[in-house]
Amino acid sequence: MRRQIPLYIVLVSGIVFVIQFFIPSHESEFIFEYGQDWVMVIGILALPLGIWSYLRKTWLTAVKKPKERFFAGVSLFGFAIMMLTGLKRESLMAGSLYMELFEYVLIPIQATIFSLLAFYIASAAYRAFRARSVIATMLLGTAFIVMLRLIPLGPISDLNQALVGWILSVPNMAAKRGLLIGIGLGAIATCIKIILGIERTYLGRD
Amino acid sequence: MKWHEKMLNIDRRWIYLILGVAVIVPAVVSFHVPVNVTPEVRRVYDFIEDLKPGDIFYVGIDYDPASLAELHPMAYAILDQCFRKDIKPVVATLSQFGAGMAEQVLSEVAAEYGKESGIDYCYLGYKPYPAITIMLMGVDFRVPFPQDYYGTPIDSIPMMRYVHNFDDLKGVISLSAGTSSEFWIIYGYGRYFMPLALGVTGVMAADYYPYLQSGQIFGLISGIKGAAEYEALTEYKGEGLKSIPYQTASHVVILAFIIVSNIGYFASRRSKK
């Protein structure tokens, strides 16, 4: 019974929402809105679970692993300070402590971490882009041409731009479209299997 | 170790150091890099330029601080163009970290033109679940956003009085560094047929050309180069054009390393024969 009820809910709601998508009417819009509200409610209920899970895991890390205690402490402190400073609606206005922390701590941290990617890309490009085979040479040539578009090459720049445009909108697009069609068909097949109860891994194990 | 083996085995710390120096150079020695405007960027510019004063245009700040360097300049240039032409932007974010950044860019650009919240623009804030939020905005903005970011009920906002759903907008641009751009294509265009343009990071751009060719999106701004192109069109003096020399310098270094690596590879192959 514990597995049967969720399967019936998925079957009924799946069929209802597939039909709803193709019938534009007020009743259909009502069902759609009502369903979306339910999804949001379920999502919001998952939030306290996520917070509890994060706090518990970080706290246990701090207690059980002395070497990671400092980092766990920073993580918990960051969580507490952002939550406490962001409780009031006024904290969303520019100049509040919450927004100052966001602008001068969180934004630089995330931007810095992401900018480090450039160094890894440089190292990876140096090792990966070698003309070892025909396919690798094609990859190397394509990467070279696309990267050259940011470098002023005088009269060749226009030609290079045109070539980059062609690479992106012909071979790249053909490959991407093939992938997208394959992914789309796969997604439809998986959805049908879930609705019909053939695919049940999302239910977990008893 | 032979010279070609050295070329093949450069320590990655040297690569990091040289790239680091290359990124610093444009800060010390300023130089100009010409920017060619691509058709997909020009289409976004032309679309907004053809809107009439008072038209409502949706701008999605759907990215987080990690992509700020590439997407923030686009947001500045697009909002500047909107305010310059008296177009009224409705701004919202589908990224959890986007709310603060959207507030920052909107308040700065609006202040430059003396625009008022609720009259000349509306900032709705953040809502989770991008797909659901997009679909609900298609039904009525009041469902996912009963209040704006500042807590004012939507019905009390003069600009939003006659704006109910996508039918009342002229178009949408989503500046995105994640999957929300795909949700905009699937639901914003697929379900509601909204004229849609995207601003994405450089690495994401190649994924969206099929949608451009099929007409599902009418324009595409990609990465910092796209932002620079947009700034060149709008003549907005932002970070996009300023960032191009840094990217050019780093690309020159990466290309140089690729050349060195291949010279070493071919020389080592020849010596083995």
Image (tube, rainbow, N blue to C red):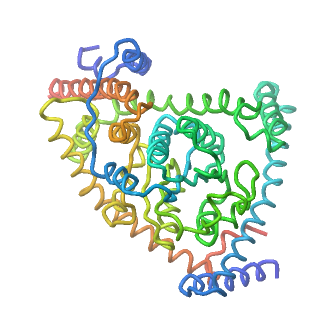
Say which residue appears at 54% left-offset and 52% top-offset: B89
Residue B271 position within the rendered picture, expressed as x and y whole percent measured from the top left:
16, 23
| Quadrant position of residue B135 | bottom right
Say which residue appears at 56% left-offset and 50% top-offset: B62
Say which residue appears at 23% left-offset and 27% top-offset: B259
Residue B128 position within the rendered picture, expressed as x and y whole percent measured from the top left:
67, 56
Which is nearer the eye, B190 or A189?
B190
- Quadrant containing the C terminus of chain A is bottom right
Task: Give the vertical position of A112 relative to B3 (above or below).
Answer: below
| Quadrant position of residue B219 | bottom left
Which is nearer the eye, B119 or B131?
B119
Which is nearer the eye, B81 or A116?
B81
For this view, does B4 lie left or right of residue B247?
left
Task: Give the vertical position of B56 relative to B85 (above or below).
Answer: below
Count every numbered label the image shows and give the total: 0
Residue B236 position within the rendered picture, expressed as x and y whole percent measured from the top left:
40, 35
Task: Give the vertical position of A79 relative to A23 (above or below).
Answer: above
Residue B80 position within the rendered picture, expressed as x and y whole percent measured from the top left:
47, 41
Say which residue appears at 45% left-offset and 45% top-offset: B78
Task: Give the vertical position of B182 relative to A166 (above or below).
Answer: below
Which is nearer the eye, B248 or B154?
B154
